Image (cartoon, grey):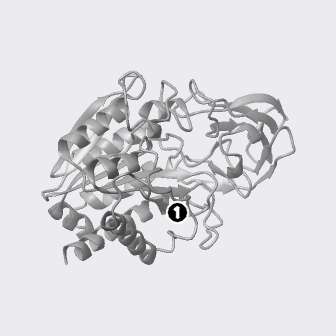
Amino acid sequence: MSDIRIDSAFDSGNIEVLSVDGASAMLAIPKDTNSEFKQWYHFRVSGAAGRELVLKITGLEESAYPGGWPGYDSCVSEDRDYWGRAASTYDKNEHGGTLTIRYTPASDIAWFAYFAPYSMERHHDLIAEAAASEGVDYVQLGTTLDGQPLDSLEMGEGEFKVWLYARQHPGETQAEWWMEGALEVLTDPADSVGRELRKRCRLHIVPNCNPDGSKRGNLRVNAAGTNLNREWVEPTAEKSPEVLAIRNRMDETGVDFAMDVHGDEAIPVSFLAGYEGIPGWTEEQGNRYYRYEAILDRRTPDFQTEQGYTKAAPGKANLSMSTNQVAERFGATAMTLEMPYKDNPASPEPEQGWSPERCKLLARDCLAALLEWMDARES
């Protein structure tokens, strides 16, 4: 039998082929652009119809988050539309940490990725469709280092200023699937949640904060090798033009409520992180965040509050992170939403695990929770 072929020279592709033997391969993940981060992979395998693939991604104890690999199953698709899971095992002692993926494709091409990719082409389709919707204003906030547009959508007639932004870390593609779900709610004239939010809010939406890193196949940085979510104190045109453009627009519009959407490599559940530890912390501002968190927890089993990040001590918040900076700068109710790469053990879905579809459904729950939170706040 001939050897399989492995390719990654496409939008968000990322893998290094070490060796191929029949339907087996030894692989490694290259580092992000000008960076030591590595975790995101996306590649296709051809010539494998009906053959069991054995794909070994090596050197993962030196990846950005080695704790993300135990209990993780690779994402796989044969049509680039439906993304399922391929049975995977992790051995930290094999070749410096090895994820072994086993999968038998029915067709001659199969695509593998750390999470279901969200291509720049799909991003442009998302922007075009939303911008064509009634009452939506398109704003180009700036241009990236690679010359790509930084896209923003604005809508709504209300006074309450809401900012939703995603993919500061480009390999966290869950975030833009969430954005697709949010925009479906907000631009559908038949959706009562979207209609009411647009009546009461002015919404500012940035579906992809890091187009360059997305296209380059990075996990965490932009074209300059900068982690954008550590740039919110002093962003620069040279290192972080994306953050500079977004923060400048926030300064123009103001912010009352903000959600920064991410994915977490190791924790297998969805959760929120707040702004405990900011210098300007008040109980009233903190309670606004906790009320929202409690509403979302009640609304959906795909969210929980038991697992998450350690809260910062008083006065010790990292203001270079967007949630802390926005909460401090504007007195806003700000938060980071994290979604998993793994499945939710409390509500498992064996075929897909955590999936694009669940990201989109969580977005609707987040928006419905915002509406309920506003009702309670106003009453």
- The quarter of the image holding the C terminus is bottom left
- Residue in front for this viewpoint, 58 or 283: 283
Residue for point 42% across, 55% down: 178
Q: Amino acid at mark 1?
A: Ser
Q: Identify the image quadrant of residue 47.
A: top right
- The quarter of the image holding the N terminus is top right
The reply, left or right, for residue 69 in relation to residue 328 is: right
Residue for point 48% across, 30% down: 222
Q: Identify the image quadrant of residue 8.
A: top right
SS class of the residue under badge 1?
Answer: loop
- Residue in front for this viewpoint, 297 or 100: 297
Badge 1 density bin: few <14, some 14–19, many ≥20, Cα 10 Å? many
Residue 375's place in the image compared with 109, above or below, is: below
Residue for point 79% across, 41% down: 56
- Residue in front for this viewpoint, 161 or 88: 161
Q: What number of labels is visible? A: 1
Q: Identify the image quadrant of residue 310.
A: bottom right
Q: Which residue is mark 1?
A: 270
Residue 184 horizontal/vertical position (percent): 32, 58
Residue 89 horizontal/vertical position (percent): 79, 53
Residue for point 71% across, 46% down: 66
The reply, left or right, for residue 160 in relation to residue 291 is: left
Residue 109 horizontal/vertical position (percent): 65, 41
Residue 51 visible in the shown view: no
Residue 163 visible in the shown view: yes
Residue 119's place in the image compared with 336, above or below, is: above
Residue 87 horizontal/vertical position (percent): 74, 56
- Residue in front for this viewpoint, 200 or 316: 316
